[in-house]
Amino acid sequence: MAAAVTGGAALGLSTAIEATAAGRQPRAARTLVGAIRWDAYTGRDTRHGMGTNRMLSPEKYHFRMPYYSKITVPQPVLVDQDFDSETIGAAPSGWTVSAGVGTKVSVVQVPDGAGRSVLLHDTSTTGMASMSRTFAAQERAVTLRWDWKETAAGGWARALVVGGPTTVVDIATLRDAGGTHLVCRTPSGTWQVLQTIADNTWYSIRVVVDPAPPAGATPWVDIFVDGVRKAYHLPLLGSPATLDGLTFQTNPSKPLDLYVDNVSVVVTESVDCDETSQEEMDRQIRYAAAAGIDYWAFDYYENPELRQARDLYLSSAYKNQVKWCVILFGSAEEDAKFPELITRFGESNYQKVLGGRPLVYFFSNATAARVTKMRAQAAEAGLPDPYIVVMRWTAQSAADAKTTAGADAVSRYATGAQSGAAYSSLTASETTLWSDYAAAAGQVIPTVTTGWDARPRYEYPPPWGPQPSADYLADKDNWTQQATPAEIAAHLHEAIRWSNTHPANTPANCVLIYAWNENLEGGWICPTLYEMENSGRPLRLDAIAGVPRTGS
């Protein structure tokens, strides 16, 4: 493939980087360039694939979808209404309104801010006010959002999600001896408290309803209040064939003023990112090889969904074009697979360093017992001693883990920066970390982070891992500005130069890119759908292809 940029000058490398480091002569040997693989792109009918699809479904994240992705629902927005352009005093457009004696449903000026909202004004004790909106019937998950407040909290306001005549979700407010609460109805008819609420306070509600989850799982609803998940996978109240409506209403026996604003309904999963075919894996290998990627470091999972990509790689006729190694997590499942893994160490496409030593990364749980067991089994098989690298988030913890486990070197999975920091801030931090890790632990494999933006996980929390989890909350402002292809190439070049001017710390002479396909977290070099559609070229890989691989 033709490179978009070539040579140090075209990459905008600094004079300091282009110059030989003080007192060191760069080695001329070629540096191996690897890239991390995290393979949850398993399609809409799997749990991991469903989660990945839903996190990448918002249009603002489409630019990062892998090239093999498909937009399955071109118009996923079913309702999007903020009422700001509507006539004050009129009923909200598109809604069916019911207002008996002593009640009214109308657009009003927002009482405590700019814009307009809908007021369900109810002074009656015998009737109620309601507004209902239908949308195109959906067989799969939908996400509904709205803002609402009561002037006096706990007045029995309700929001109903329906499929035809069947209510599937019922959210309400109530006042009892314990205070005022937001609640939801369970299939047994009881009310589950979500949180306490206050008078005259806006709350942002998000409801994800999945009537047909993958693998025959029970249909469920998740409820979020102001971005925080308050209910996880509650069973639905009914099982209609489709979902098609939303209703807000007051209580027939209680006066209430309920304000509703910013209502939206979207198809939760409007894309499908599925790499699980031999054709796609073969194509990825060719892309990587053309860009000079020497090896992939696979996150080593035994989960049947997550190991599919690795199995497809190992069955590919092109597998020798890009070698591979493992990133282990130190699980009992991995321990049981050591004999199989040791056999792989001896194969020609497993990445070796230092004259034939199999390269092994440990992300976590690199105990002395595991490392000793791996070394012993490799020796029994007549193979060279594995070159074992432990990954940790700080230099000192990496050094400690290396010493405790008896590993050979240290590295880091990725480096991030928060609150929209510039990519240059990330690279400056990471460049310092290479030296910090070397000073603390001796031998290092430098990490080259291509980006960090975990916000998709905040908007749709990952369905994997221990649940329910609140980890997603940390991802709200956990992002770095997007890098250009030239900036990524410059950072890679800097890592190769650093490696070659620190030969005592980098005897393995390799670097590790984060990542080939951590698209959900913002680190990728795999071609994207938008790259290929808009430019016809894998721009990040083109830039990487132009980076010199030696310290010369």
Image (cartoon, grey):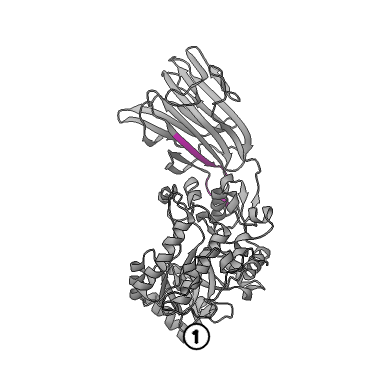
Instruction: Give whichever of 9, 40 is nearer the camera.
Output: 9
Query: Which portion, as a residue range, is magenta?
Result: 204-218
Of 390 and 346, nearer the camera is: 390
Q: Does the rendering let one see residue 338? A: no
Q: Identify residue type, mark 1.
A: Leu
Q: Position of residue 489 (x, y in %)?
A: 55, 64
Q: Is residue 208 magenta?
A: yes
In which quarter of the view is residue 319 placed? bottom right
Which residue is located at x 46 percent, y 40 percent? 223
In the picture, which quadrant includes the C terminus? bottom right
Location of residue 504 with respect to 361 vertically, above or below: below
Q: Residues within 10 Å of mark 1 (few under 14, many from 20)?
A: some
Quarter containing the N terminus = bottom right
Judging depth in this view, the residue of 80 and 500 nearest the camera is: 500
Is residue 549 visible from the viewing direction of this image?
Answer: yes
Vertical placement of residue 518 versus 321, above or below? above
In the picture, measured across the screen, residue 83 lies left or right of residue 136, that is left
At mark 1, the secondary structure is: loop
Vertical side of 391 occupied by 347: above or below: below
Would you identify the image quadrant in which residue 331 lies?
Answer: bottom left
Q: Which residue carries the number 1 mark?
A: 383
Q: What residue is at 46 percent from the left and 86 percent from the top?
A: 380
Q: At which x and y percent is residue 85?
A: 57, 25
Number of marks present in the image shown: 1
Left or right, residue 157 beside residue 68: left
Residue 2 image position (x, y, % from top left): 67, 66
Query: What residue is drawn where x is 40% and y is 75%?
Result: 370
Residue 232 among those drawn in magenta: no
